[in-house]
Image (cartoon, grey):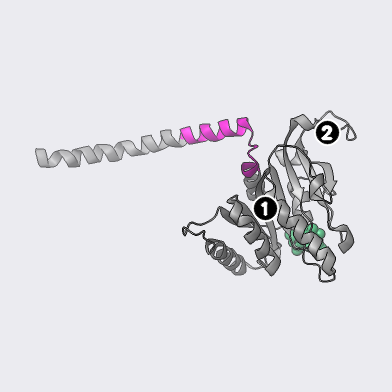
Amino acid sequence: MSKLWQARFFTTVNQLRDLPDTQVPEIAFAGRSNAGKSTAINILCNQKGLAFASKTPGRTQHINYFSIGGAHVAQHRKDPTIVDEIECLLVDLPGYGYAEVSGSAKLHWQRLLGDYVQRREQLAALILIMDSRRPFTELDVQMLEWFAPTGKPIHCILTKVDKLNRNEMANVLRQAKAKLASYVDEDGEGFPFTVQLFSALKRVGIDEANDKIIELAGIADPDDADLAGAADAAAEVTDAADATPDSATDSSTDAEPNS
Ligand code: GDP
């Protein structure tokens, strides 16, 4: 069971001054409306109605927070979340790109999202959700460029790959990697940007996205780390065993010139 399955509605805010004063890491999800952001959050958290797509532009200007930790299995659904026990917060940012949004609503979006991603210290990483058939729209690039200077990671999730054939999937992934690699800082260094393919419908990339989010939030279970450590140790043992015949051959070869 993934830790993300513990996700629980925490709060909703419409103004930056109302952001919670929690200090735990935040992982924010951004994307164009209709890119599949709510569907991705719901499937990763294994809850159908956690994040919901609002098709009403006026209702899209909120930032919704979901907590991981702070609620126990035995706890009643309506019991308050224990804030001190929250391990991280998932942040569902308002979807952008509604054609019909008026100038003032656009400005509100720009200020809310721009200020949040650029200034929120607790923000650990951004998950950028893009439709694999139309990635890197102007507003997606705007998000990337707002966030890149913070030096924090961006993980791009290219959704709905069930609409692509294998060839198209490979091309889209390759092009996205090239696009992300084209961003460099003034010293010519790349940014911590990653990308993956995803389909909620065909359940492609769910484990990969889950593991990445857990890693970015820094909430991996110590038990999992122990398991990974044990696996590494086992691999080292195997490597050492594999190496033995080689080193035996090497030493005999090395010995030849002397004899
Ligand atoms: P949001 O506006 O970004 O939150 O997007 P939604 O999650 O509401 O998804 C927008 C539309 O795309 C909905 O009709 C979803 O059913 C559809 N959708 C989401 N994920 C997938 C997917 O993996 N494959 C396909 N084919 N459709 C998807």
Query: In the rendered image, which quarter is residue 79 located in?
Result: top right
Disc ID at residue 11: none
Q: Is residue 5 magenta?
A: no
Residue 160 % position (x, y): 71, 62
Highlighted range, magenta? 214-234
Give the residue pinned by disc 2. 81
Residue 156, percent from left and from top: 64, 57
Question: 143 left or right of 241?
Answer: right
Task: Tell me the SS state at disc 2.
Answer: loop
Q: Residues within 10 Å of mark 1 (few under 14, many from 20)?
A: some
Q: Position of residue 71 (x, y in %)?
A: 80, 32
Q: Which mark is residue 118?
A: 1
Looking at the image, can residue 202 be seen? no
Quarter holding ligand 1: bottom right
Q: As drawn, which residue projects farthest toward the front?
A: 17
Residue at the image position 85 percent from the left and 29 percent from the top:
75
In the displayed orientation, state which residue is furthest to the bottom.
99
Please tell me in which quadrant of the rendered image residue 114 appears.
Answer: bottom right
Where, by quadrant of the figure, is residue 149 drawn? bottom right
Quadrant for the C terminus, please. Answer: top left
Q: Residue at horizontal 65%, vertical 53%?
A: 205
Mark 1–mark 2 CB contact (< 8 Å):
no
Residue at 74% over, 45% down: 90
Mark 2 residue type: Thr
Q: How many marks?
A: 2
Near-viewer residue (77 or 207)? 77
Horizontal side of residue 35 vs 56, given as left or right: left
Query: What element does badge 1 sit on?
Result: helix
Label 1 vs 2, first from the N-terminus: 2
Q: Is residue 150 visible?
A: yes
